[in-house]
Image (tube, rainbow, N blue to C red):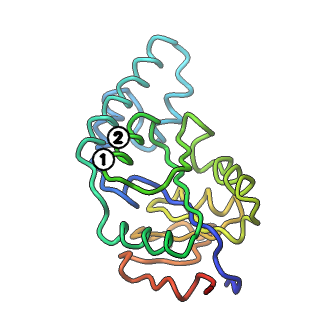
């Protein structure tokens, strides 16, 4: 368990800060991706350029459609406001495309400027995006929390040597991965317990 205060927060977007209704089973069926494979990984390995680009465009279309209806996850906005009040740096790392990410952030007035999408760095569970943010903030990765709602988020945090917080996702089926905190609602979080007081 970490004893030092948390100095920065990085968040996943879909299912963590905002809602998402993306139907990955439908998406996989439409592009021919096996149900047990990762969509982005599958698309990246399509050899035929025309087919790969068509699959990429379809996924972006679905993401943009989903983005129009995304709303704040209950309690997330208030939690971010508390972090802002304590001058805690915040960022977003998402597997979304940049255009859909921008729609979700702008429509919900999410007060985070530092945002990395799959067009900016390799997609999670690759830790590159998290490592880039730690470098920009000039912080030790262990002083930063990555908050997400899926195993890729936990894996990325572990590989970046950051603290992994799991929002509503039970990672017990993945014993090789370390979760530093589980929580089911942002209203459970007491910022005074983990942020250094001024």
Residue found at the far left of this picture? 69
17 and 51: which is toward the camera = 17
Regarding mark 2 in the picture, which secondary structure is present there?
helix
152 and 10: which is toward the camera = 10
Regarding mark 1 in the picture, which secondary structure is present there?
helix
User: Label 1 vs label 2: CA separation?
Assistant: 6 Å
Residue 100 in the image: state x and y as whole percent: 38, 38
Q: State left or right for residue 37 relative to residue 178.
A: left
The quarter of the image holding the N terminus is bottom right
Q: Is residue 188 above or below residue 99?
A: below
Residue pictured at 55% horizontal, 61% vertical: 90
Residue pictured at 48% horizontal, 41% vertical: 38
Circle 1 Cα neighbour tier, 10 Å, few/some/many (<14 / 14–19 / ≥20):
some
Circle 2 Cα neighbour tier, 10 Å, few/some/many (<14 / 14–19 / ≥20):
some
Q: Quadrant of residue 194?
A: bottom right
Which residue in the structure is indicated by mark 1? 107
Which residue in the structure is indicated by mark 2? 103
Residue pictured at 62% horizontal, 85% vertical: 198
Residue 184 in the image: state x and y as whole percent: 37, 76
Q: Are marks 1 and 2 in contact (CB under 8 Å)?
A: yes
Q: Is residue 160 above or below residue 125?
A: below
């Amino acid at each position: 368990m970490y004893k030092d205060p948390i100095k920065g927060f990085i968040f996943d977007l879909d299912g963590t800060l905002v809602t998402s209704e993306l139907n990955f089973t439908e998406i996989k069926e439409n592009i021919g991706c096996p149900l047990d494979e990762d969509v982005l990984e599958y698309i990246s390995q399509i050899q035929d350029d025309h087919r790969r680009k068509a699959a990429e465009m379809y996924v972006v279309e679905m993401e943009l459609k989903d983005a129009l209806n995304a709303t704040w996850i209950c309690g997330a906005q208030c939690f971010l406001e508390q972090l802002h009040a304590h001058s805690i740096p915040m960022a977003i790392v998402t597997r979304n495309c940049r255009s859909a990410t921008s729609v979700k952030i702008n429509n919900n007035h999410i007060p985070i400027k530092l945002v990395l999408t799959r067009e900016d760095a390799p997609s999670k569970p690759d830790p590159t995006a998290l490592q880039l943010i730690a470098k920009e903030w000039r912080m030790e990765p262990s002083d930063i929390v990555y908050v997400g709602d899926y195993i890729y988020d936990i894996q990325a945090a572990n590989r970046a040597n950051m603290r992994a917080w799991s929002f509503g996702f039970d990672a017990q089926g993945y014993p090789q991965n370390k979760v530093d905190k589980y929580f089911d609602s942002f209203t459970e979080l007491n910022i005074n317990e983990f942020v250094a007081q001024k």
